[in-house]
Image (cartoon, rainbow, N blue to C red):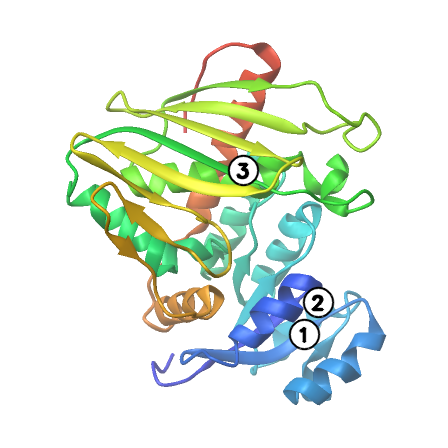
Amino acid sequence: MSTDKRLGVALVGLGYYSTHQLAPALQQTEHCHLAGIVTGSPEKVPVWQNRYGIPDKNIYSYDNYDSIVSNPDIDIIYIVLPNHLHAEYTIRGLQASKHVICEKPMALSVDECDAMIAAAEKANKNLSIGYRLHYDACNLEMIRLAKEKIYGEIKSIDTAFCITPQKGEWRLDKKIAGGGPLMDVGIYCLQAVCYITGMQPVAVTAQSFPVSDKEKFKDIEETITWQMEMPDGLVATCKTSYSEQTGYIKVNAESGWFALNPAYNYEGLKMETSDGKQFCVPPFSQQAKQLDGIAFSIKNNEQSIVPGNMGRRDMKIIAAIYEAMQSGKRIEINY
């Protein structure tokens, strides 16, 4: 594959994230571009064609999705569907000999993750997960401060990500979402602990709380706190909820602290430190950097920094947190 070619990306699912984040980001990328769409809403097609000049031959429905195999314009398929469809459409995309980016969470279970990874290996294609913050300058600065021990050894990490979805949203339906806020935004917290420390947890404990609205939260958690024990003895305290709005990371070290607040938003991230330093960057698209980073790795025949195995690891951690929440026990994690 020529490293000069801009890879063609097809977005599968034209909801909010594709419409307002990914498609605009693909107008800013150097190594890839928006080449096609897959949608079950025919009324959206002329809008997207008028806005982005997508040719008829690169427009697909879910019925003819598999025929994308014969389209040389499309190199990468980006799965932007509700969680319960991630495994199916990722596997079908890989079987169509396309590289795949799958939005987080990777799937509803570790078994689904295994099937997706096996499909990527069989097809000899790249499978990446849509973890945009691995390409975000502020989060990368948090990683640098930790790795270089600018404030000494890390003593503890405190992080939370909470949002307030409205009744009727698919993310409140366990069959579609696979769980509650842990599967949706809590995954950012466990991700942050892993990439800041460079480690993965060996055990977890967790606590849930009575729901405030039994109809809204009839089969998912409303709020959950959990603790991640890392191999060096560090304990990270995490929280996620569907009943408040917050998102931060604070890292406490031997000689000071460094924090992001907000930490997980698409823009406006701001870092502060115990010695008064601030780190913020001009507005940029996290998604553009993510898409370019993944496309560049594909062009160079390398695995991306957000591979399928990372998504599988996170599903193992999530499964352990749910088990700890339900049992009240400390759960060790065997990857």
Mark number displayed over residue 37: 1
User: Regarding mark 1 in the picture, which secondary structure is present there?
Assistant: strand
What residue would you read off at disc 2? 14
Residue at 76% across / 82% down in the picture? 47
Q: Earlier in the sequence, mark 2 or mark 3?
A: 2
Relative to 242, say whether 3 is above or below. Answer: below
Q: Nearer the viewer, residue 125 or 33?
A: 33
The amino acid on which the numbered mark 1 sits, given as a three-letter code, is Ile
Mark 1 to mark 3: distance in Å? 29 Å
Could you tell me which quadrant the N terminus lies in?
bottom left
Could you tell me which quadrant the C terminus lies in?
top left
Q: Earlier in the sequence, mark 1 or mark 2?
A: 2
Q: Nearer the viewer, mark 1 or mark 3?
A: 3
User: Regarding mark 3 in the picture, which secondary structure is present there?
Assistant: helix
Mark 2 to mark 3: distance in Å? 24 Å
Residue 40: quarter of image: bottom right
Q: Nearer the viewer, mark 1 or mark 2?
A: 2
